[in-house]
Image (cartoon, rainbow, N blue to C red):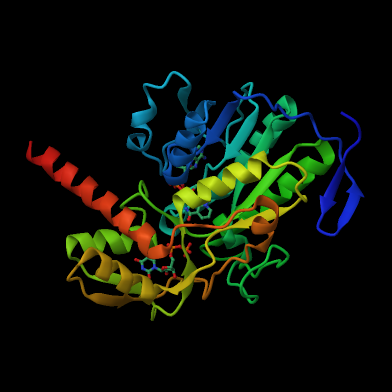
């Protein structure tokens, strides 16, 4: 392959020599964090497309039940491994999703969270450099911290506290992006960076403390719905199927401008609006109660997705009410199954 150029928006610059990327139909795809919420949907999608999938997970927040239905597929394998330790495998593509996403979970062992993002991503970039695999990095809207620009475009550098309880996640993910940038320029690794905004759907962990799963579980159990703070803070919620579609487009597109892509649903809701929707859709009699707002909790969050729309032809299709309904049905069925199993 000859000397390539990489395009940053509005300019074409001399860039690194990218390694040739496999374009044949069946690929060996490594998915780290494949037993987690988003990762399990991605494993499923890649198997449906006819690829071989190697799922790597240390099961810190993942669950074997998320991938149990894939075990009979001969194209699927699972390795219990921590990405903080190097890995060697002959692969064509790497999706690096390993990292707890829920604030209470990533704050439980903050040093390990930073190691997962920094050392883990470096190990996978090394693997990509050795094998010529294209690498997808699951970054996050948290790189914008508590944003002073709204909605957030990719050009915004963010407002992150490096010295707080969320820093292990936010700064770890920021450093991982920096590593992607430098491995691209120094070693020609073909990287795709997704800045993912709050995503929800079936297979979220019922106990991981994120707002959508908390509210749905509380509503279905008739428990109080716990709003942190006054509930005027906003988030933008993307249904998991929409997100996975954006991953595939980001990974499969050619001639993309180099740099991160915001992936999320630009519909913006207050946490109170979310609570009211969940109560309404689940027909729950739960009351709303208020708990203290966690430290450094961002006030507002909404993606500017013009870049994804322009270059990937992508925009989310599932409206919040519809996605919540599907997620409520999932948790409802899960709890009924578990209570039947417990009775038996
Ligand atoms: P999740 O916690 O359900 O899944 C993460 C998976 O990674 C789990 O299976 C966990 O066991 C595994 N893991 C964690 N540390 C690991 C390590 N050191 N080695 C190997 N495996 C490890 O979270 P999710 O919601 O599925 O998020 C997936 C990715 O997307 C994460 O990287 C997260 O930061 C990113 N993301 C998610 C959201 C969201 O709203 N879900 C938003 C922004 C970014
Ligand atoms: N939140 C809440 N009640 C809960 C869980 C979360 O009010 O039971 C709030 C949280 O303080 C934040 C928003 O909901 O303002 C989203 O929280 P989540 O943990 O899902 O993700 P974040 O975007 O903060 O990483």
Quarter of the picture containing the N terminus is top right
Taking depth in this image into account, of 106 and 133 the one nearest to the observer is 133
Q: Is residue 56 left or right of residue 330?
A: right
The image shows residue 342 at horizontal and vertical percentages of 12, 40
**Residue at the image point whose x is 70% and y is 26% from the top:** 22
Taking depth in this image into account, of 63 and 305 the one nearest to the observer is 305
Quarter of the picture containing the C terminus is top left
Q: Is residue 7 left or right of residue 77?
A: right
**Residue at the image point whose x is 60% and y is 54% from the top:** 314
Q: Is residue 115 visible?
A: no
Taking depth in this image into account, of 113 and 183 the one nearest to the observer is 183
**Residue at the image point whose x is 88% and y is 56% from the top:** 11
Instruction: Note whether 130 is above or below 118 in the view shown.
Output: above
Q: Is residue 268 left or right of residue 114?
A: left
The image shows residue 256 at horizontal and vertical percentages of 75, 47
Q: Quadrant of residue 191?
A: top right
Q: Quadrant of residue 18?
A: top right
Most extreme residue toward the left, as rendered? 343
The image shows residue 262 at horizontal and vertical percentages of 62, 58
**Residue at the image point whose x is 20% and y is 48% from the top:** 335
How many numbered marks have been drawn onto this rendered protein structure?
0
């Amino acid at each position: 392959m000859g000397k390539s150029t990489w395009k940053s928006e509005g300019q074409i610059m001399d860039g690194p020599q990218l390694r040739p990327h496999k374009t044949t139909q069946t690929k060996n795809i490594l998915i780290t964090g494949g037993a987690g919420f988003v990762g399990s949907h991605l494993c499923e999608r890649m198997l449906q497309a006819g690829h071989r999938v190697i799922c790597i997970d240390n099961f810190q927040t993942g669950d074997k039940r998320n991938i149990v239905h894939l075990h009979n597929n001969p194209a699927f394998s699972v390795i219990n491994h921590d990405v903080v330790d190097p890995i060697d495998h002959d692969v064509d593509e790497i999706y690096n999703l390993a990292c707890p996403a829920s604030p209470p979970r990533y704050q439980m062992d903050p040093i390990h969270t930073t190691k997962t993002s920094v050392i883990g991503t470096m190990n996978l970039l090394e693997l990509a450099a050795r094998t010529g695999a294209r690498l997808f990095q699951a970054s996050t809207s948290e790189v914008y911290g508590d944003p002073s620009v709204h909605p957030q475009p990719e050009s915004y550098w963010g407002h992150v506290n490096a010295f707080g309880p969320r820093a292990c996640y936010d700064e770890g993910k920021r450093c991982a992006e920096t590593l992607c940038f430098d491995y691209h320029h120094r070693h020609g690794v073909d990287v795709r960076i997704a800045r993912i905004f709050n995503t929800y759907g079936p297979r979220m962990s019922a106990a991981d403390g994120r707002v959508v799963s908390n509210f749905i579980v509380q509503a279905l159990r008739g428990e109080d719905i716990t709003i942190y703070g006054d509930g005027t803070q906003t988030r933008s919620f993307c249904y998991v199927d929409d997100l996975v579609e954006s991953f595939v487009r980001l990974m499969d597109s050619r001639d993309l401008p180099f740099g991160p892509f915001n992936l999320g649903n630009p519909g913006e809701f207050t946490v109170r609006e979310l609570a009211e929707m969940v109560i309404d859709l689940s027909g729950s009699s739960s009351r709303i109660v208020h708990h203290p707002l966690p430290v450094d909790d961002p006030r507002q969050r909404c993606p500017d997705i013009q870049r994804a729309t322009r270059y990937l032809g992508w925009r989310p299709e599932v409206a919040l009410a519809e996605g919540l309904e599907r997620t409520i049905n999932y948790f409802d069925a899960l709890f009924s199954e578990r209570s039947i199993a417990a009775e038996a």
